[in-house]
Image (cartoon, rainbow, N blue to C red):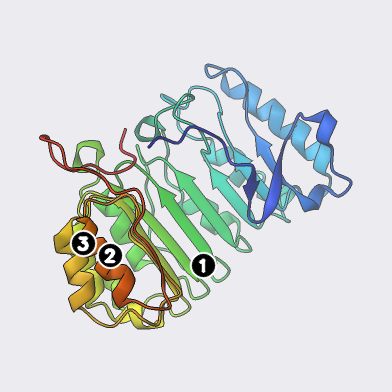
Amino acid sequence: MTINSNLTTFAGLPIVAWNDEDNAPDDPGAVAWRLEVEDFDADAAEIERAFEELLKRVGDGGPVALVVGEWGGAYEREFPIDLLVRNASRLSRLRALFVAELTYEQCEISWLKLGDITPLLEAFPRLERLWVRGADGLALTPVRHEGLRELVLQSGGLPVEVVRAVAACDFPSLTHLELWLGVSNYGGDARADDLAPILAGQRLPALTSLGVRNAEIADEVAAAVAAAPVVARLTELDLSMGAMSDAGGEALLTGQPLTHLTSLSLSHHFMTEELAQRLVEELPGVRVDVSDRQQEEEWGRYTAVAE
């Protein structure tokens, strides 16, 4: 699997490009706006000009939801976090932000140059959704944010320092957390123990939906989740896109009860058909997704997204 198409909706809103005159909405606040440049090698001034044009179209307060794609040189130049931070006063309506929503044809996920995203959380206290794609250079300092409800970090390899920082943050309103751990070859060096503060269930009091996805260590994660206190109050658990084998599936079956869940996603896995079927049968009333079964090759098991 690769990320081969851009989103068409974000935060429940249809996405409209900043320069799409044919689909101009009557209400600029009823859509998510995509900000990007066409030339993958564009200089920094071009994304600045596009940003200014977007604000002219949207009006006072800026967009409610913003999706930033190609900013020019995404494979070698960091995401322009400063562009957003220094214009925070002009983006007072911003509630949902997707950083680096690029396909693999624009830039492979593990090549995307990010930076410290802490200033975004500090500059936008009313932000409710933050999605970030890529992890090369990604950094986060533990911070408290009262309004954030959804945090999604998509990567082919999420650095352990970032995982630990997320675990140390205070997000009292966060209901959905999604971490793509990825593989060690692309910087994904976190272990299940690094998730312990999250799995303990005390740091994130409002959490009801947890995704630990795209994990090379999916079996290890499953074993930790099987005994995690936070699971008792979850409605959705997503361990999909990883390298889970029968060992991980058995851990889920022999661990704490999961019948209270609304959904359990394990798609893209390496479990046998027999064990996958047991998970479906032994969790009646739960939407168990065991689709996209993979065959282990001579070089081993793999996650859905790496490079």
Task: Kindly indicate the quadrant of the structure image that contains residue 222.
Answer: bottom left
Question: Which of the two marks, 1 or 3, is nearer to us in this view?
Answer: 3
Instruction: Tell whether 12 sits left or right of 300.
Output: right
Say whether marks 3 and 2 touch (CB < 8 Å): yes
State the CA–CA distance, disc 1 to disc 3: 44 Å
Residue furthest to the right: 26
Label 2 element class:
helix
Label 3 element class:
helix
State the CA–CA distance, disc 1 to disc 2: 41 Å
Instruction: Name the residue beneath numbered marker 3.
Output: 274
The amino acid sitting under disc 1 is: His
The amino acid sitting under disc 3 is: Glu
The mark that comes first in sequence, 1 or 3, is 1
Crowdedness of circle 2 by 10 Å Cα count: few (<14), some, many (20+)?
A: few
Instruction: Identify the disc placed on residue 145.
Output: 1
In this picture, is 124 found above or below 234? above
**Quadrant occupied by the C terminus:** top left
Residue depicted at x 22% and y 74% = 253
Task: Kindly indicate the quadrant of the structure image that contains residue 229.
Answer: bottom left
Instruction: Name the residue beneath numbered marker 2.
Output: 277
